[in-house]
Image (cartoon, helix red, strand yellow):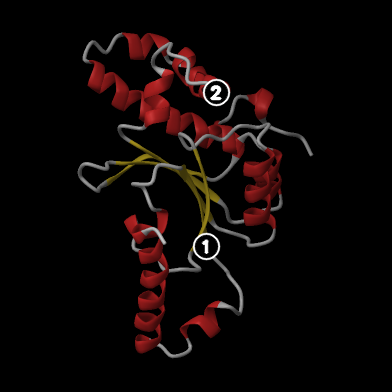
């Protein structure tokens, strides 16, 4: 058996032993159900583990991850997660969390073809199109890259606000707030890009749904 693969199973046993040494009923209580207050929509990057970087425990964060933390309205996987989180789990917060040095965002800055992922990256390019004037005015490529990451997070938060799932929750006076964060892998610090969106008033009228 591959040594790395075997270490995963061994580490699991050690983790279980450690948890039980602290609380003998830890797993029994966890198995009773989940009531996380938060849905995390993050990047699939292996260096950005949702629970760990915010100090959350199992059961506290419902998670959806994809390349470049995108909210794409035709993505039935993402929409199903949001629907379950909002309408079943009744989460109070949804955080879209991107990160600096995101490979997906970096790929969207150029024209190189990467295969089938080009179709996903095209959605990221839409953010550049919407903010082309601001981004092209930034001469330093590294700073432009960082700003592109931030703008992409902001766009995804408002794309989330445009969904019928979220707007219907607001119509029903459900306590639901959207936030946008960017995580620095180099520093470990989170920067708040969008502090709180709690209704659809910040959307252009054409996106405000009439139920």
Mark nearest the camera among 2 and 1 is: 2
**Which residue occupies 65% across, 25% down?**
205
Find out whether the residues at labels 2 and 1 contact each other: C-beta distance under 8 Å: no
Rendered location of residue 97, percent (x, y): 42, 43
Which residue: 62% across, 43% down? 78
Q: Which residue is mark 1?
A: 37
The secondary element bearing badge 2 is classed as helix
Disc 2 to disc 1, C-alpha distance: 29 Å
Which label number is shown at residue 201? none
Residue 23 x %, y %: 40, 88
Q: Residue at x 56, y 35 (%)?
A: 71
Sort mark 1 into few (<14), some (14-19) or many (20+) by Cα contacts within 10 Å: some
Q: Quadrant of residue 31?
A: bottom right
Q: Which residue is mark 2?
A: 123
Q: Residue 18: horizontal and vertical position, in percent?
A: 34, 81
Looking at marks 2 and 1 on the same chain, the residue that comes earlier in the sequence is marked by 1
Placement of 52 over or under 120, stated as above or below: below
In the picture as drawn, the residue positioned furthest to the bottom comes out as 24
């Amino acid at each position: 058996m591959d040594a790395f693969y075997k270490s995963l199973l061994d580490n699991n046993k050690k983790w279980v032993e450690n948890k039980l040494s602290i609380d003998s009923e830890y797993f029994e209580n966890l198995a009773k159900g989940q009531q996380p207050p938060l849905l995390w929509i993050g990047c699939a990057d292996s260096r950005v583990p949702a629970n760990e970087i915010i100090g959350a425990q199992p059961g506290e964060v419902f998670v959806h991850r994809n390349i470049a933390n995108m909210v794409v309205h035709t993505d039935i996987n993402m929409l199903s997660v949001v629907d379950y989180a909002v309408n079943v789990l009744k989460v109070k917060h949804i955080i879209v969390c991107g990160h600096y040095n995101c490979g997906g965002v970096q790929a969207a800055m150029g024209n190189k073809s990467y295969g089938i992922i080009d179709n996903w990256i095209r959605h990221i390019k839409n953010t550049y199109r919407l903010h082309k004037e601001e981004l092209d005015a930034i001469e330093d490529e590294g700073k432009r890259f960082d700003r592109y990451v931030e703008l992409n997070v902001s766009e995804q938060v408002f794309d989330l606000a445009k969904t019928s799932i979220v707007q219907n929750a607001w119509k029903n006076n459900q306590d639901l707030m959207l936030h946008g964060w960017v995580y620095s892998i180099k520093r470990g610090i989170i920067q708040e890009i969008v502090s709180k969106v709690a209704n659809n008033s910040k959307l252009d009228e054409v996106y405000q749904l009439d139920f």
